[in-house]
Image (cartoon, coloured by chain):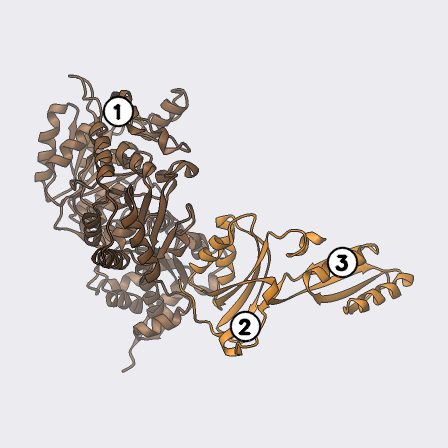
């Protein structure tokens, strides 16, 4: 599953945090642009921000398909796109969430609960022969968790895709980080 | 004072506030409400015969006036018929506003009669589009659409309006400039180039020994022809004008090398290949200009001025990227160059380069074989006659194919905004409606469309519109009974295996067809008849004229750089092959 990790073996991935006006069709505009220009999206997460007028889209892009510079410049051309931050993993905080249903006999259940506790995950639901757990963490953490669960047999899983924000510079104020201004194009 | 209007009334009033003087369109079910207040409006509406015609007319109008063209049609099939012009305008950065009707909001998504996902379909071929869900939003959406279409890199916008939104009531308002800007926090085109970059460009320009000004359509969009000329004359740098920039620099100017690219002049193509500095102004390194990119102008440094940051480095990485409006940037560039010169800096001697370029120009003029007595007319001959007979300031419009390349090659473009064509999308059928739009925009000018027989058959019905609306355009069909450019490729690259390119030497009868549409129709079969026919066409100003030039079917466009080949592998007219060595 390490292929799911944006910073694992494949360093061709990069994270874009895109602040957009929260308007109908904005996600379609972004995804249509990627499709039309032949850019590959590795994962995409979108939700409204603290300001109701704006949404933030976190996109993990595949740089094998196009240069990052072209992707960001083309994205900038969308009228609804207000600001794009390229998030360097060294200077950002990142999280992903996974939910997994694993086969679990009565004997195995204890092992899985223990494993989940070690990873600081949560038990969401317990069935007769399966158990559903969740974990949020860095993508590599989630990869490791999945590897550990694999031996029991995974029934279903769903990852959210990465969400990320820039790591706060000690000198930076919260309002500077939040300001939607500053787009040059 | 609050004034209550219907959405339809608000739409038409908003268009009036945007100083729309003319719109091109065709009514139908969902857009019907908007056509009612139009009766009282001072806006002239031109009723087309096909929605594609409305779109191309709006483009032609925008090309020659610099003002946004407006096309209004209904939902569903009308909207899809508008797709080609929208895409054409997007590729060529033409300011245009499309207005489409949509099924009532409650019916959206139900596959209602004449419903289609217009904003979805046009998303990737408009600069921006908007489905209006409330009548109250209409004035703001209209202002945004015109603002976005005409600023930054111009382009088409589309407003999709459900029928009930046109019928519902709203309270009239007209948003201020600030309100429009505040509503678009993600849209702030950068028009002023970076000072440091402009200074760096000035230094490179003065140091270059073999520079070329590579001028694209952005120079016309920025209305920068005058400052371009000043820059060229100050620095004595030769100029090439791309297909989209013909007219931005006078063809008769000693520094003008004509058009570069696949069917450009040998001089323009070779000068770019050999140059040590390409000053790209509002041009986008299109594949038809560069040929094989890896072999394009291999020794040249690049200064790239473009208002669209995404053009910088898209094809070729510039040494000096400058994001900004071509006119403002060239003005600053001129200042920077003059300052450097005043501070004692010397420009490198471009004399030897200019004489080398002049040598190419003498050795490799455009060439074709004159027709033998009794043989078919040559299309190039027709163009020379059309050009020589045209009144000063004539606007020339073309479709797409051989006739387009010949027109660009053989016409003398002396003024900006006298050339209208479909460059990026290559839309056959563009000429007739675009010429009508151009004539509406500039009724004071003679408008000639040079068309092919293939192109003409795609949109000719708009000549009915032209006759009824008294828009006296002139159409010269270079009729070789073939899809000529396709035929040329099949002859040259498919071993003369002609597949589905012969249109018919007898049908349609273009003269009768023209007459049936209210035009004067003239047929020219012999070189002797050409001049008189053209004079007659030029003398008719109360109705459209169609001249059917029956031209040789096997004539090919030269020079030619075959697709995917390096510009060094240019194919010349056979009479110049012996001199090929001069291009080294």
Q: Quadrant of the N terminus of chain B?
A: bottom left
Name the element at disc 1: loop
Report the chain holding disc 1: B
How far apart marks 2 and 3 lie (CA) works out to: 30 Å
Badge 3: few (under 14), some or many (20 or more) residues near its Cα, within 10 Å? some
Shade of chain B as shown in the rendered figure: brown
- Whether residue A147 is visible here, answered yes or no, is yes
Percent across and percent down for residue B505 are 27, 24
Hey, which quadrant is residue B477 in on the image? Answer: top left
- Whether residue B97 is visible here, answered yes or no, is no
Percent across and percent down for residue B514 are 20, 36
Callout in the foreground (3, 1): 3
Residue located at (24% from left, 55% from top): B337
Of B1 and B255, the residue lying toward us: B255
Report the chain holding disc 2: A
Question: Looking at this rendering, what residue extends furthest in the front direction?
Answer: B344
Q: Which residue corresponds to mark 3?
A: A146
In the rendered image of this protein, does residue B35 appear above or below residue B572?
A: below
Q: Are marks 3 and 1 on the same chain?
A: no
Tag count = 3
Callout in the foreground (2, 3): 3
Q: Are marks 2 and 1 on the same chain?
A: no
Q: Which residue corresponds to mark 2?
A: A49
Which numbered marker is on residue B12? none
In the rendered image of this protein, does residue B47 appear above or below residue B531?
A: below
Q: Which residue corresponds to mark 1?
A: B506
Q: Quadrant of the C terminus of chain B?
A: top left
């Amino acid at each position: 599953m390490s292929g799911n990790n944006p910073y694992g073996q494949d360093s061709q991935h990069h994270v874009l945090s895109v602040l957009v006006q929260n308007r109908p069709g904005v996600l379609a505009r972004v995804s249509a642009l990627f499709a039309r220009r032949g850019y590959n999206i590795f994962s995409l997460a979108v939700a409204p921000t603290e300001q109701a007028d704006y949404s933030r889209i976190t996109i993990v892009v595949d740089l094998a398909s196009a240069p990052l510079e072209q992707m960001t410049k083309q994205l900038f051309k969308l009228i609804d796109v207000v600001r794009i931050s390229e998030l360097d993993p060294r200077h950002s905080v990142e999280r992903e969430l996974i939910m997994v249903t694993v086969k679990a006999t009565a004997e195995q259940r204890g092992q899985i609960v223990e494993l989940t506790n070690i990873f600081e995950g949560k038990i969401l639901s317990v069935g007769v022969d399966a158990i559903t757990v969740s974990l949020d963490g860095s993508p590599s953490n989630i990869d490791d968790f999945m590897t550990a669960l694999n031996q029991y047999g995974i029934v279903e899983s769903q990852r959210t895709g990465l969400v990320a924000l820039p790591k706060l510079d000690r000198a930076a104020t919260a309002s500077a980080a939040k300001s939607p201004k500053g787009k040059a194009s | 004072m609050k004034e209550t209007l219907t959405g339809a009334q608000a739409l038409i009033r908003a268009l009036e506030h945007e100083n729309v003087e003319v719109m091109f369109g065709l009514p139908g079910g969902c857009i019907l409400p908007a056509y009612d207040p139009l009766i009282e409006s001072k806006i002239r509406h031109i009723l087309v015969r096909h929605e594609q015609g409305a779109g191309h007319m709006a483009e032609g109008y925008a090309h020659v006036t610099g003002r946004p063209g407006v096309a209004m049609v209904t939902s569903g099939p009308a909207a899809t018929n508008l797709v080609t012009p929208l895409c054409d305008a997007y590729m060529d950065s033409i300011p245009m506003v499309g207005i489409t009707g949509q099924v009532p909001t409650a019916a959206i998504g139900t596959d209602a009669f004449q419903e289609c996902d217009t904003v979805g379909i046009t998303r990737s071929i408009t600069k921006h589009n908007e489905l209006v869900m409330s009548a109250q939003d209409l004035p703001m959406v209209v202002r945004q659409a015109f603002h976005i279409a005409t600023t930054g890199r111009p382009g088409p916008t589309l407003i999709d309006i459900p029928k009930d939104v046109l019928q519902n009531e709203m309270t009239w308002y007209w948003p201020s400039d600030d309100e429009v800007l505040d509503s678009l926090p993600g849209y702030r085109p950068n028009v002023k180039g970076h000072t440091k970059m402009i200074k760096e460009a000035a230094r490179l320009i003065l140091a270059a020994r073999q520079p070329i000004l590579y001028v694209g359509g952005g120079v016309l969009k920025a209305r920068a022809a005058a400052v371009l000329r000043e820059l060229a004359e100050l620095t004595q740098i030769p100029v090439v004008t791309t297909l989209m920039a013909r007219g931005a620099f006078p063809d008769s100017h000693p520094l003008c090398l004509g058009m570069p690219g696949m069917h450009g002049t040998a001089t323009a193509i070779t000068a770019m290949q050999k140059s040590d500095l390409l000053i790209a102004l509002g041009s986008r390194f299109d594949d038809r200009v560069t040929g094989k990119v890896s072999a394009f102008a291999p020794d040249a440094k690049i200064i790239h001025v473009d208002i669209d940051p995404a053009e910088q480095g898209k094809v070729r990485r510039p040494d000096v990227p400058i994001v900004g409006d071509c006119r403002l940037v060239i003005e600053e560039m001129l200042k920077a160059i003059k300052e450097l010169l005043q501070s004692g800096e010397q420009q490198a001697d471009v004399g030897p380069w200019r004489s080398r370029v002049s040598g190419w120009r003498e050795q490799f003029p455009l060439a074709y074989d004159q027709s033998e007595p009794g043989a078919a007319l040559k299309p190039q001959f027709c163009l020379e006659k059309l050009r020589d007979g045209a009144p000063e300031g004539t606007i020339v419009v073309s479709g797409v194919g051989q006739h387009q390349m010949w027109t660009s090659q053989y016409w003398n473009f002396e003024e900006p905004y006298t050339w209208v064509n479909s460059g990026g999308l290559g839309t056959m059928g563009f000429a007739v409606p675009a010429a009508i739009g151009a004539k509406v925009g500039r009724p004071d000018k003679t408008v000639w469309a040079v068309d092919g027989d293939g192109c003409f058959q795609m949109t000719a019905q708009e000549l009915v519109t032209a006759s009824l609306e008294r828009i006296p355009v002139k159409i010269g069909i270079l009729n070789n009974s073939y899809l000529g450019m396709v035929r040329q490729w099949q002859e040259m690259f498919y071993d003369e295996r002609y597949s589905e390119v012969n249109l018919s030497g007898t049908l349609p009868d273009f003269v009768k067809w023209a007459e049936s549409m209210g035009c004067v129709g003239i047929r020219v079969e012999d070189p002797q008849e050409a001049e008189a026919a053209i004079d007659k066409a030029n003398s008719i100003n109360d109705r459209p004229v169609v001249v059917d030039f029956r031209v040789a079917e096997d004539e090919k466009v030269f020079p030619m750089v075959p697709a995917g080949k390096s510009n060094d592998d240019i194919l010349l007219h056979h009479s110049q092959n012996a001199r090929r060595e001069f291009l080294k």
